Image (tube, coloured by chain):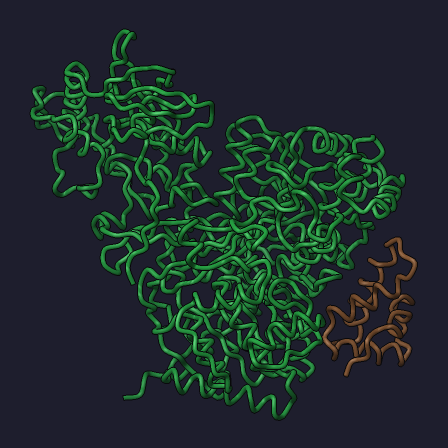
Amino acid sequence: MSPEKLARMANQIATFFRAQPAEDRAALVAKHLNDFWEPRMRRQLLDLVQAGHADLDPLVVEAAGRMRAPA
Amino acid sequence: MKDFVIPWDDADKGTPAKTGAPVTLTVDGIAVTVPEGTSVMRAAAEAGIQVPKLCATDSLEAFGSCRLCVVEIEGRRGTPASCTTPVADGMVVHTQTDKVAKLRRGVMELYISDHPLDCLTCAANGDCELQDMAGMVGLRDVRYGYEGENHVFARAGGEANARYLPKDESNPYFTYDPSKCIVCSRCVRACEEVQGTFALTIEGRGFDSRVSAGMAGDDFLTSECVSCGACVQACPTATLQEKSTVELGTPDRKVVTTCAYCGVGCSFEAQLNGDRLVRMVPWKHGKANRGHSCVKGRFAYGYAEHPDRILNPMIRESIDQPWREVSWEEAVGFAAGRLRSIQETHGRQAIGGITSSRCTNEETYLVQKMIRAVFGNNNTDTCARVCHSPTGYGLKTTFGTSAGTQDFDSVEASDVVVVIGANPTDGHPVFGSRLKKRLRQGAKLIVIDPRRIDLVRTPHVEAAHHLPLRPGTNVAVLTAMAHVIVTEGLVDEEFVASRCDTEAFEDWAAFVAEERNSPEATEALTGVPAAELRAAARLYATGGNGAIYYGLGVTEHSQGSTTVMAIANLAMATGNIGRPGVGVNPLRGQNNVQGSCDMGSFPHELPGYRHVSDDAAREVFEKIWGAKIDAEPGLRIPNMLDAAVSGEFKGIYIQGEDILQSDPDTRHVAAGLAAMDCVIVHDLFLNETANYAHVFLPGSTFLEKDGTFTNAERRINRVRRVMAPKNGYADWEVTLLLANAMGADWDYTHPSEIMEEIAATTPSFAGVTYALLEEKGSVQWPCNAARPEGSPVMHAESFANGKGRFMVTEYVATEERTGPRFPLLLTTGRILSQYNVGAQTRRTANTVWHQEDVLEIHPHDAEVRGVREGDWVKIASRKGETSLRAHLTDRVAPGVVYTTFHHPDTQANVVTTDYSDWATNCPEYKVTAVQVAPSNGPTEWQRDYAEQAGRARRILPAAE
């Protein structure tokens, strides 16, 4: 998947949870990614985060650290 | 297998059933007790006595015109019509006195004096109520002769008979023969009361009276008639007659089954001679349709015998080669070998499959089982991905269950109905008719849709409010409605306090109450006048039982899941949950969308909506399946295509879905399919996706297999085999062959065994057995120890997850924006006569109503572009362009254009984008920025596509 599309999808998720009244929004984003993203997509997202992809929502970056590491 | 006969009473009792206090009367010496309001005719029928009748039938209110059903009642003068006379306590009725017998013979004699005596060659011979009644009343002579004025003969006295009208054969499915009409008005009343179209009337008076469709000069085809067939079913003679019966003769046996078109899931009697299907007649005991149908279910089944249908398996090494017909063994062996070899080279995760929302629960269950247990991964998805996946996510988050809350009967108790992003009279016609019936009784209607759908104003129905929102602003509109409800104190505090998570409610209420969410603040964005929106919100909150029905105009957006949550919020805030007449009701697109979701088609969920990471749930299946299940979610359809383009996904088994035509961004789908080494298409026809396939496995129709479908109301209906599969195997058997070729050891011999496995593993289906379905006709899940007879209404006492959960629904604009290059918004939908990608309906006579997709454009937008009615126009988006003809109409607002996606020549999805719902990747079909310009005809892309499709469909002559 193109990095732009992956980043856009992750950012959409972050945008939804940012509006939710919760103590730990990053945990909600991480849970959504764990529950619905296939490991290869999560791996690619982690790679983007590590590479410092410019377009990622900060909440995605925060959530990435809390994501279950793909096997 | 013997015909299935349910021990239901199919007799026509003459007038509809009533509910009321018991009333006891005597009919011909037999005491009978019936509800107050029941007619004497029906009471007699309950006592086992049939009163002769012609204009009465129990699907219609009594009319009292034929005078054949007269009876004598002690203490009353004259001979009242039993159909229009209500029962009274202690009434003593005589149905067979000399006096009424003489009267009936006289009436009958008059009818027959103006009716042809061609019974033996008549299509209704043996199935004619006029014939039956002539026999029943003992008619022996017609003293008036046939020479006088009549409607029967084309010529009279050597001259043309001005009263005679020739047969109207304009409708492709039925004929209207005025010479056989007895003017009982049953057809007119069926069109009004059952269908609600009001296309028929009786024109003229007295002897000039006759049935007329539409306006003067119309025939049935040019009139507003929607060809639902209710009139044909109601007609007691051969006046309105199916052409199939004319051709094939009257049927001699019937099998009750379930329609395979939309999510209403109508029950039908397939009426046959031997294994030859003569006609489909809606089953009066069907709980979804209550004896009604639409043009698709009743008439559009001819695709099953269409010459395009592929009946032999085919393979090819690569997609540039022609197809080669092979044995089932070779085809399945070829497919299994390729899939395994892909896994050896590219890994276990490099293949997957798509289950079909058109196939049965049992078939869908098997496909996902094969993927999880035999492929060894969770790369399973279904076309619900592209339609109602946000419903699953949104309702599970708020209510705890991924399903609609009501049965269809519920609408009969609704006072206010909100229809959002759905077009029931086209997409879900039988529900549309049931809804219109309720609206004619006085229920109020609110329509939230960019387009002025028929329901906004149609005979005897007018929406109280139509909110014509700008596509993509659903969340803003619904949140503004919530703003009105909260800030004007219209919340059902008691319901919220007792049934919902109050902390979440407080957060939500504070959010929606913010000024920026008010109708006035969002008007510029949504295009909905604030005052109208406020009035609609007040009506929904205070008008009595409020029910919301919604469709893909809600889900197919970047914020599809958020919109579903916004709908659930509104229902909870107003206490419209948990009883008849209220609720949140997704109108499902395909016949078994609900079922395919229930059966674990999604890559993250096992059957019964249990996440694959749930160890206990996995263990249940691992034990029965004898295989390890991956604990990680698999790829969704769009993810599969992305992975295919990047070379990580190489093989796919697609059962009964045409993703190349139905999924967005056609070029991307084509690129994904072209990048794979093994595409297996299992379908009735060489569909568009098959242009990129290496293996074609012929499918079977719903008439050719046993199983179950689950409709939009969670109703599990039996599908019963009417004839043997023309391709040799039911679809579940084909999946079984493939799984076993890949090393499984499955030995199912009947779908009932698959249902036993589903019940054993899935708590909400625990009580479902074929025996129960035979007994009850159908059952709505959850069906288990707690609810052995199923659940018509959900969340009655508490929500599935305890407390209902309000979710904050912040509006986020889609990234698909209009601008100078693409100033218009394209939204898509469907029409009554065609279904989805049209694979079935395009291969029936339904094409007379819709031969091609057209672009609806507002006259203003057309004028500034120099586009006239019927012109070819090119529609272009950032993704692609296609051409089709324009239709100028103010049903769409300026700035909005609309089309359908039923025809592959148009390929509306060439222009749609790959933007998708944030939670589920459900594509954003409903919003695409486009430009429209005059054109000379099909685009280069369309010509290339047609050429490629032609090449890809070549089939080598079979080897000797």
Q: Does residue B440 appear to the left or right of B305 in the view shown?
A: right
Chain B is shown in which shade? Answer: green
Horizontal and vertical percent position of residue B678: 54, 83
The residue shown at (45%, 56%) is: B260
**Is B505 on the left or on the right of B28, as rendered?**
right
Residue B429 percent across, percent down from the top left? 49, 44
When the figure is inspected, residue B245 is found, relative to residue B115, above or below; the finding is below
Residue nearer the viewer, B945 or B519: B519
Residue B635 vertical position relative to residue B281 in the rendered view, above or below: below
Say which residue appears at 39% left-offset and 73% top-offset.
Answer: B749
**Residue drawn at 75 percent across, 76 percent down:** A41
Residue lying at 45% horizontally and 43% vertically, measured from the top left: B289
Q: Is residue B833 left or right of residue B133?
A: right
Evaluate whether residue B547 shows in this view: yes
Q: Quadrant of residue B773?
A: bottom left
Picture quarter with the C terminus of chain B: bottom left
User: Residue B489: image x %, image y %?
Assistant: 83, 31
Please tell me in which quadrant of the rendered image residue B704 appears.
Answer: bottom left
Q: In the image, which lettered chain appears brown?
A: A
Q: Nearer the viewer, residue B734 or B640?
A: B734
Q: Quadrant of residue B401?
A: bottom right
> From what the image shows, is residue B426 above or below residue B342?
above
